Amino acid sequence: MPPLPALRLRVYVMGRAMTVAVVQPGGLAEESRALKRALKRVERRRRLRAIGLIGPLFLFLAVVFALPIVLMLHRAVDNPEVVTHLPRTTEAIQGWEGDGTPGEPAFAALGQDLNEAFYARRLAEPARRLNYEITGFRSMIMATSRKLPRGEAPESWKRTFLDIDPAWSEPRYWQAIKDTAQPYTLHYLLAALDLRMTSDGGVVAAPKEQAIYRGLFGRTLWMAFVITAASLLMGYPLAYLMVNGGKATRGVLLIFVLLPFWTSLLVRTSAWVVLLQQEGLVNQALQWIGAIDDPVQLIYNRFGVYVGMVHILLPFMVMPIYAVMRGVPASHVQAAASLGATPFTAFRRVYLPQTVSGVGAGCLLVFILSVGFYITPALLGSPRDQMVSYFIAYYTNQTLNWGMASALGVILLAAILLLYAVFSRMLGLGRPRLA
Amino acid sequence: MFDQIGWRAAVAALAVSALGFAGQATARDLTVVSWGGSYQDAQREVYFEPFKEATGTSLLEDSYNGGLAKIRSMVQTGTVTWDVVQVEAPELIRGCQQGLFEFIPWDKMGDRGNFIDGAATDCGVGTIVWAVALAYNTENVDGTPAGWADFWDVEKFPGKRGLRKGAKFNLEIALMADGVPADRVYEVLATDEGVDRAFNKLDELKPHMQWWEAGAQPPEWLASGDVVMSSAYNGRITAAQKEGQPFKIAWDGQVYAIDSWVIVRGSPKMDEAVEFIRYASQPENQAGLPKAIPYGPTHVAAIEEVPEDVRPDLPTAPQNLENALRNDTEFWIDREESLDERFNSWIAQ
C-alpha cells in the first residue's frame, strides 16, 4: 500500500492564517496537540490584550466605587472607639455581671485609661460613642477626666471616682461601657431602622418621638416613585413626538431636552427658586392674568421639589425611550392598522410592547437617580420633603457620626438593590438596553 | 481578614491621592478660613488687608459653612491646607478634644485675663460675640414685639414666622416664650419634662413656620414679606438696616455665643498663624470690626474702644444683656444629636 499523501492544514485563528500540520498517519495525535497549543497561545494573547484594555477601568472602579462601598459596609458595623481607646477597661468589664457597682479593678482600669486617653487627646471618640448610649455621658467622662489625679495612682480609684461624681456608682453607666466594648455593633443599623438594642440583647422599637428613619425611607421611595411616574407620563409622548414628528420638530425638541441637561444642576435649581418664589415670575403672571388674588406657595413644599426634580431628570427618561422608539419600524403599526386594529389597539398591542425596554431603562435611571438626590430637595423643599441623603450629609458633615451615615447608606443601597431585583423581574429585563 | 485587606487597600489608595496632593501641600501661603459673605468682607477690611500690609506676610482666604468634617480629614490624611479657621464654640471644644487643633501658645498671645469669660481657651482665641435674636420688619408688623412671647402671639402680630431649622436655639427660645427666665432655661431643658414643654410650645407655632438654614435667609425673607418676624443672626440684620431695610431687633431673650480662631493641627505655617491671631486679637484691631459689622469684640479693652453709635447694636451692650442667654456649649455637645433627631421627627409630622 502506497503511503498516504501528506496533508497540509491551513488553520485560520482570529483571522490569522497559519500552517499547523502536515498530517501523516500515526502523527495525528501529536498534530492535534500542536493545534491545541497554537489555539491556546492565540487565546491567551487575546485575553491579555482585553485585560490590558479594561484594566485601567477596572482599577478605577475598584478604587472609586467598590472600595468605598466596602468601607461603608464596614463602617456601619464598626465599633472601635471603646475597644481601642479604653483597652484596660474593656478587659476588666468583661467579668462584671451587670448588678451593682463594679469593684476596684474596673475603676482602676478606667482611671488609667481615662488618664492616658485624655492627655493624648484621644478620649473624645470613646466619650462620644458612649454618649450615644446615655445622653450626658460624654460630659461626665470629660469632666471626670479633668479632675482625675495624674501620675501617682490614688489609694482607691473607686473612691476617687465617686468623690468626683457620685453618678459613677450607677450600674447603667457601666452597662453602657460593657455594651460598647465590642469590636462590632448593630447599633447604627438598628438605629437607622428606628430600633434600639436593650442591654440583654433584645431589640425594641425607638420611642415614638425619636422614630424618623422608617418614615424617611418610605418618603424617599415614594417621592422617587412619583417623580419617575411624572417623568414617564411627560417623557413618553415627548419621545414619541421626537421620533414621529418632522425633522424640524425633532431638532427643536432635542435641543429643548438637551439644553437644560447641559446646564449645571445648581443653576437650574436656583432658577426654579427665582420662578416659583412668593414674588416670583409664576406668581406674578398668575396674579396679572387674574387667576389668583394672593400669591400661592409654590416653593419650599413638595410641589416645588417635584417640579425641580422632574425637570432635571426628564432627559434621563426621554433619551432611552427615544433610542428604542427609533428602532421600531413604522410598518408594524401600519400592518396592524391594515389588519383592522384601531389606532389605540395598534399602539397598545404592537407599538408599546416594543418600547418596553426603553421605558424600563428610563424608569430605572430616573428612580435610582432621584432616590439619591440632595441639592434640589434641600433648596426647593421644606423639612418635610427631605430625602435620605439629607440625613447622610447631616451625619457626615454636621455631627461626624459616620457610623450612622454609613448605616443609612447601607439600608438605602439594600432597598435599591431589592427594588431593582423586583423591577427587573417584573418587566423581564435581563439587561436594560441603553442606547 | 477583611481588616487587613481593606485597610491595606485604603492605605494604598490614600498613598496614591497623597502623591497627587503632595505638590499642593508644599510652599503655600498662610490660609485663613472664615464664614464668607458680608462678615468676611468686614474681616478682610479690618484684619486681612492691614495684617498683610503690617507684616508683609502673604495671606490666602477661604470660606466654609462650619463643621469639623473637612478639618478632620485634613488632619487625618496629613494634607493640611488650612491654617487658621474661625469655629463655633461646640466645634472648638470637640475639635480640641479630638486633637484637631494646635494648642494656643498663650505666652506669645498675651494674658488670658484680657479676654471675656469663655474667650480664652486651650485651643482657641475668641474673636466675636454673636447672637440669635428676634428680628422683624416694621412695615409688616403693627406695634412693637418685645420678646419671644410676642413672637408666639399670632393674633396680635399675624403673619409667618422664621426660625432656624434644628433643635439648637429653638428649644431655648420656646421655653423663654413659655415664661422661663433666661438664667433657668438650661436647667429646665436638661429634664425630659422641659424638652416636652419646649416641643409643646413649638407645636403652637408650627402652622405658621418657615424654617431657615443659611444666615442670609432671614433678612431676605423679612424683606420679601415671606415672614414678618424671624430669629436671625444680629449682624445680618444690622447689615440689612444699613442698606435701608426697615428691620428692628428685639433683644430680650437673645441667645449669644462666641466664635474663636483656631490653628489646624499640623499646620506648616504655625508661626504665621500665631502672628495673625495675635494681630487680630489686639484691642485696637478688634475694635474696628463692629463698625463694619456689629458683632461684639472679645478683648475687654476693645469693648471700650467701640464707637458710641455702634454700641447699642452689639449683643454685649449692657441693655441688650438684661435678659440674655449664653448658649451652653457642653449642653449642646451632649444633646444636639438626640434632640435634633427628635426635632426632625417632630418637624416631619
Image (cartoon, rainbow, N blue to C red):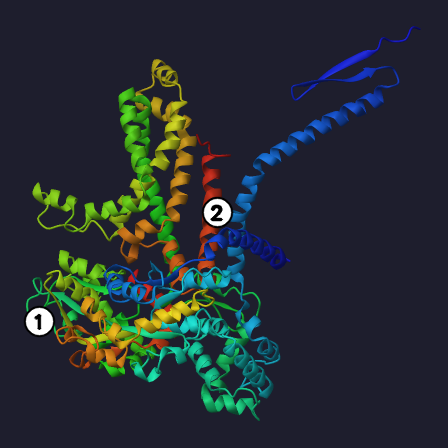
Q: Quadrant of the N terminus of chain B?
A: bottom right
Residue closest to the far right: A1
Query: Residue A408 or B110: which is nearer the viewer?
Result: B110
Relative to A119, does residue A187 appear above or below in the rendering? above
Residue B200: x %, y % from top left: 25, 71
Residue B23, placed above or below residue A347: below
> Residue B223 in the image: x percent, y percent?
14, 58
- Give the percent coordinates (x, y) of residue A50: 61, 33
Q: For the residues marked 2 and 1, what is the alpha-carbon distance in whole angstroms?
A: 57 Å
Residue holding disc 1:
B144
Q: Position of residue A33 (x, y in %)?
A: 80, 25
Residue position marked by numbered label 2 in the rendering: A418
- Who's the residue at 35% across and 51% down the image? A374
Q: Please give left or right for residue B138 compared with residue A412 in the image.
A: left
The image shows residue B285, relative to residue A274, as above or below, that is below
Q: Is A381 located above or below residue A260 in the figure?
A: below
Left or right? Give the position of B170 relative to A433.
left
For residue A233, what is the image quadrant?
A: top left
